[in-house]
Image: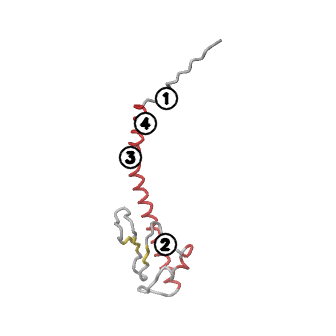
Amino acid sequence: MVRIRIKRNAGFTLVEIMVVVSIIGLLAAIAIPSFLKSRDTAQLNAIFNNLRTIEAAKDQWALENKKGTGDTTNLTTISDYLKGATIKPVVSETYTTNPVGSPAYATTPVRLGTYASGDQISVQ
């Protein structure tokens, strides 16, 4: 009869587990700030694109309705010229269209990039 010996102390030591956990922590410390910055940049770019869409809709509305510089607009007025008839907020921002000839702007409740909470974001 052949006996098989089974070694019962298989596994990782505490030091090995601590090394793995510290490496994972180091990688997370490097990756998380980059992720947050890229998320802010993406959200800011989405707001800029929404503002460009509003400006294009204002111009189209003014052209088709024979309106000129200084005529007032709002999102309801230009909704027929927006895809989906609305602008979808990114971070619960509010959009102000301003009269024709004046740039629209957005106000966000959160900090995005160099813009603080409550700052007016507009496309230059």
Question: From the viewer's perspective, is the residue at label 4 or at label 2 nearer?
Answer: 4
Picture residue at 42% right of the left edge, 77% below the top: 96
Which label number is shown at residue 53?
A: 2
Q: Nearer the viewer, residue 53 or 94?
A: 94
Q: Residue 51 placed where, x, y %?
A: 45, 72
- Foreground label between 1 and 2: 1
Residue 72 appears left or right of 86 = left
Helix, strand or loop under label 3? helix
* Crowd rating for badge 3 (residues with CA inside 10 Å; few <14, some 14–19, many 20+): few
Q: Is residue 105 above or below residue 27?
A: below
Look at mark 4 in the image and give the residue it sits on. Answer: 20
* CA distance separating discs 1 and 2: 59 Å
Query: Image height check: is 26 above or below 52?
Result: above
Q: Three-letter amino acid code at disc 4?
A: Val
Chain-order first, disc 3 or disc 1: 1
Residue 75 seen in this snapshot: yes
Circle nearer the viewer, 3 or 2: 3
Disc 3 target residue = 30
Q: Which residue is drawn at the image coordinates 49% and 79% (left, top)?
A: 75
Give, as a three-letter code, the residue at label 1: Gly
Amino acid on which the number 3 mark rests in the picture = Ile
Residue 1 placement (x, y as % from top left)? 65, 12
Residue under numbered circle 1: 11
Disc number at residue 97?
A: none
Tell me where residue 6 sits by quadrant.
top right
